[in-house]
């Protein structure tokens, strides 16, 4: 399955927001940089907006971690109810036609809610309900959107996949697992 990577901004932003929750990376400067990277205009944040985004990121996690399509759809429907007020097609800044899920004058939190909820809905539809997940390595809480050709991704990164493989191998060999810092 091929995904239009130009339409992945909402999904990738959702992925990064969820993954920032459990790190020391959640700072105002990091959030502003992230939003700028994903073309969220006027991304200057105050304390209330930062709290709103942190709360929203926590609400995004269940869409990635759902173990059944129906649960994933229900989780994103909740986000769509809370995050999308209006859907419209637009072209700007030399970009191809694309959808917006919030008005430009909405607050940064409202625009991020619309962008992520709408982007996840499109991705879930294109992926047939699958291809969102959480890392299979014990102790890792990172989430991902699987755009690989085979669609069988189980880890957030090659590093986590390799670490897990080493632990499984050492377990079969009766070797005590080495501590792996992440």
Image (tube, rainbow, N blue to C red):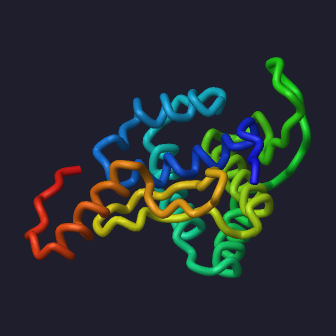
Nearer to me, 109 or 20: 20
Nearer to me, 141 or 152: 152
Residue 103 location (% of width, % of height): 80, 40
Residue 59 seen from this side: no
Furthest-top residue in view?
94
Figure check: 29 above or below 2: above
Residue 133 location (% of width, % of height): 53, 64
Q: Residue at x 70, y 81 (%)?
A: 70
Write down the quadrant of residue 176 in the picture.
bottom left
Residue 166 location (% of width, % of height): 24, 61
Q: Is residue 129 left or right of residue 91?
A: left
Q: Is residue 78 left or right of residue 32?
A: right
Q: Residue at x 85, y 37 (%)?
A: 98
Q: Residue at x 68, y 67 (%)?
A: 76
Furthest-left residue in view?
176
Q: Is residue 96 left or right of residue 102?
A: right
| Rendered-image quadrant of the N terminus | bottom right
Nearer to me, 90 or 166: 166
Residue 30 location (% of width, % of height): 41, 33
Figure check: 26 above or below 94: below
Figure check: 79 above or below 18: below
Residue 141 seen from this side: yes
Nearer to me, 106 or 136: 136
Furthest-front residue in view?
173
Q: Residue at x 54, y 70 (%)?
A: 62
Figure check: 168 above or below 36: below
Q: How many marks?
A: 0
């Amino acid at each position: 399955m091929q995904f239009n990577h130009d339409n992945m901004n909402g999904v990738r932003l959702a992925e990064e927001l969820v993954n920032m929750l459990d790190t020391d990376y959640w700072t105002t400067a990091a959030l502003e940089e992230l939003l700028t990277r994903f073309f969220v205009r006027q991304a200057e944040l105050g304390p209330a907006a930062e709290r709103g985004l942190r709360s929203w990121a926590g609400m995004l996690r269940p869409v990635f971690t759902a173990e059944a399509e129906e649960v994933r759809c229900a989780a994103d429907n909740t986000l769509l109810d809370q995050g999308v007020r209006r859907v419209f097609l637009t072209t700007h800044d030399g970009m191809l036609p694309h959808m917006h899920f919030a008005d430009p004058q909405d607050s940064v939190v409202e625009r991020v809610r619309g962008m992520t909820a709408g982007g996840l809905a499109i991705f879930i539809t294109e992926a047939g309900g699958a291809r969102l997940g959480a890392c299979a390595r014990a102790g890792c809480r990172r989430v991902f959107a699987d755009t690989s050709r085979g669609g069988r991704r189980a880890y957030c990164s090659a590093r986590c996949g390799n670490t897990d493989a080493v632990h499984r191998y050492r377990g079969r060999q009766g070797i005590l697992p080495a501590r792996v810092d992440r």
